Image (cartoon, helix red, strand yellow):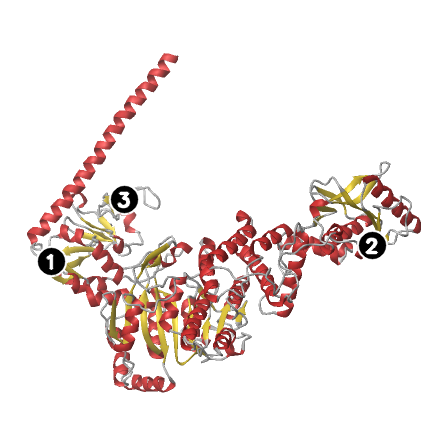
Amino acid sequence: MANQLETQLALASSLGLSELSKTAIMRGLFSLDGTQIKYSFRRTKSYQISDPEEKVRADAVAFLVLSKGYDSRKIDTEVEGSHNDFADIVLYEDDRCTKPWLVVENKKEGATPAERAEGEAQAFANGIALGAKYTMKDYGDESCVWQLEGFGARERRRNKLGDRELLPRNYSQDMVYPLHAGTEMDIKPASAFDISIAIRRAHSIIWAGGKRDPLSAFDEWSKLMFAKVRDERYTRNGHPRSFQAGINESDSAIATRVHKLFSDAKEQDQAIFPRDEKIELPDSKVAQVVRVIQEISFIDTDSDVIGTAFEDFFGSVFRGSLGQYFTMRQIARFTVGMLNPTSEDYVLDPTCGSGGFLLETLLQVWNDTDAGFAGQGNLARIKSDFAAQNVYGIEIHPTLARICKISLLLHHDGHTNIEADKSCLSPNLSKPRLQKDRQFDLIVGNPPFGTKVANGDEDQLDGAFLDDFVLGCGKQSIQSEQIILEKSVSWLKPGGRLGMVLPDGVLNNSGSQSNCPALREWLFKSGRILSVISLPDFAFRRSGATNKTSILIFEKFSDLESARLSNQLEACEGDIAVALKDSGLDYNIFFGEASHIGYTPSGRPDPRNDLYIADENGYLSDDQTGSILGEWNVWEENGAVSDSRCVAERASSVWRSHPSHRVDPKYHVYMAHKGDYVPHGWSSAPMMDLVKRMRRNVDFGEEPMKEYKVLTLSQTGVARLREPGVGNNPPEWRGMYFYDSSSDWFEVRTSDIVYSGIDLWKGVVCFVTEEFDHALVTQEYPILRVKDPNVIDPEFLSILLRSRRFQKAFRAINTGHSNRRRTQSSDFGKVLVYYPPIEKQKEIALKVRNARENIAKAYIGVSDVENELDAILHADEEWDETTES
């Protein structure tokens, strides 16, 4: 759409159209298509733009609509007038276009005296014939308006008004405006409910049922809100508001004022929109939005009310394809609450998106300031100074950056420190505070993850190199969240804190190629991992993401602490656990695991919220007892942890607890509490003490023609055979096809247990019956054999491992953050298994076996009935065919 407009404007310039005509093209009043100009009146009409007179008519139409505010839907062209002559332009008074008010006659610019005289005569003849009140000649370089009503047909002097600028507005009637600044009839603050309805309605008008893409619709919405704020701030007392619709005022007149407001706002505040940015909405849409929100004063509405209204609005708009740009407010609110910012902190979100974390920071600081400075005369100044001077953000997406700025502006400022159209990794940021390290007290955010930053990526690195970073040194590419985390820590002042949403792979992936173990080592050496809080799988599901995520709270070491740890690391040959202890820098890490976070997987509100307790307005309650945030507050005060969702472990112990030094909360909370769930009278033992892994290799070269059975598993716990010839499967499961396979194959035996190394946490585990004896599985399906069947029954164990309790345990030990998370064999062996006496085990196994047999019989019974019915219907069909023949 933008390219089409640029093409039209270039054509307009080459044809010599006036600047007013170009503005009319941008406003959608008419368009150029090759050799044609198309007018968007009540009825669309097209003419040859190569005609010099047509250029003058286009300018005259633009003048009537844009300069005088007349409704384009009340304009027509080539209207039959006097003696088979046609008026070039007719402006009507009524919507049905039956009452002509003005007739316009056009001649080409530079017309001869004879042509000019002819034009004037035609203007009068057509105006009188049509019964218009005014007539006008417009030749581009000359214009004149006459009043016809009340004068004779030959009068030319006493009824002459002058050039076209003296043409009356609004059909010679005074326009009535209902809203005047500083009076009783002025805009007013509104409730959160009323604001929410109004801004939703405004956005829906622009979105137009999906005709405009979601992000550009939001951008246009932002432009109109920018114009609205301009009008609220700079309209003098007693003067009519510009952002309003007069009584019976045309859409074009309303839109013209809004365009001017937007232009003036850009000139006065250049931090949001570039000077060449235009409102790209038809006048009708602009006027509709004005009528919806004109009576609301956003500036005079309390920031908490604005926050409540916009939280719900942003949460609903940023769904689906825009979900990547939005973090649910519950996540931002909890993260900021863990950091507990004050008005003295400098705060940065390096990938601020729509600004959710920064808005939440503003609201929490303002709330803290209201409580801490109540009654003091400088309260408002402290709040405004914090918003204007202490809150920073970086956003690479220019449209999204503008949305963020407008959102901050509507929340009473803070928008001037948003760095737009730049990556946070760029060395060429324009804000002075962003150009140096160690500048911020707090860093918050939810960086994009799952994408790689490669050397030479100008969009992301902007002249920087991966070798400039500790974690990127010597690499050709690196995961975006890793390098953004390093950059964020570099911006922290010594003792500064970070709160960031990260994929769980950063916290638990063990493969060196992932760079995650190296990242965790760097974190331990750079500061304190104060806390890690696990979020449920669905935290970002509604945006299409399947990543398992957690919130990291981190504190940067002071220079002295870094030196002490560095010296001890050198003394103990790099053993971080020893270095932490010997340097006196060992500390506790607070882990928490949230199952409920205030919204459902679909994004609907959920009263259950493990993260924090909300007050009646949804903000953080003063009393957080029973929440993870409350437990964190108590732990910070006295070091005590009593909530089973949480645990505190010494950093040195966490480092040593796993070979990969994993720091994911679900793992550490499970390991701390795994013995708490053993039922009374049951025994318990680590998995490794009860089973052994079997690897029965098969020599396919010995019998290449031998046919094998291949096993596949499902979440139902029932095994079945894989069909040959389906998908990528070979046409037959014969030895020759396995011989050259890239996978390793192993044989299962009756009473084995087989599970999926990727989907164990989903219950993909089964007991091997005689039917599947000697079947094959790949290395992705580990095979287990019970060491002593008199201690634990293998069939019972397979059922136990599919229970919800053990699925949760397997989720705790999984590594990775995608929907395909792996269970490492070493971690699997540490899982604590609890089991009743062997007789009870066999009883449970028998019940499940019988139930499954009954299910199978039921399916067979249903199939038999359906086959009987099919047989009857088939017989009837044959009988019908026979009788008809």
Q: Position of residue 108 (x, y in %)?
A: 84, 50
Question: Residue 609 at what x, y percent from top left?
Answer: 32, 60
Label 2 secondary element: loop
- Earlier in the chain: of badge 3 and badge 2, it is 2
Would you say 774 lies left or right of 49 here?
Answer: left
Q: Quadrant of the C terminus?
A: top left
Badges 1 and 3: C-beta atoms under 8 Å apart? no
What is the three-letter code of the residue carrying label 2?
Gly
Distance from disc 3 to disc 2, alpha carbons, whole Å, reads 82 Å
| Mark 1 → mark 2, Cα distance in angstroms | 100 Å
Q: Which mark is residue 140?
A: 2
At mark 1, the secondary structure is loop
Q: Nearer the viewer, residue 341 or 246?
A: 246
Vertical position of residue 728 compared to residue 6: above or below: above
Q: Which residue is mark 3?
A: 722
- Tell me which amino acid carries mark 3: Arg
Mark 3 packing: few (<14 Cα in 10 Å), some, or many (20+)?
some
User: Which element carries disc 3, helix, strand or loop?
Assistant: loop
The span from disc 1 to disc 3 (Cα, nearest Å) is: 29 Å
The answer to which quarter of the image holds residue 5 is bottom right
Near-viewer residue (291 or 48): 291
Seen at 24% across and 28% down, the residue is 865
Q: Amino acid at mark 1?
A: Lys
Residue 291 place in picture, x, y as percent: 59, 53
Give the residue at mark 1: 787
**x and y, in percent, of residue 422 in the image:** 53, 69
| Rendered image: mark on residue 391 | none
Front-lying residue, 760 or 188: 188
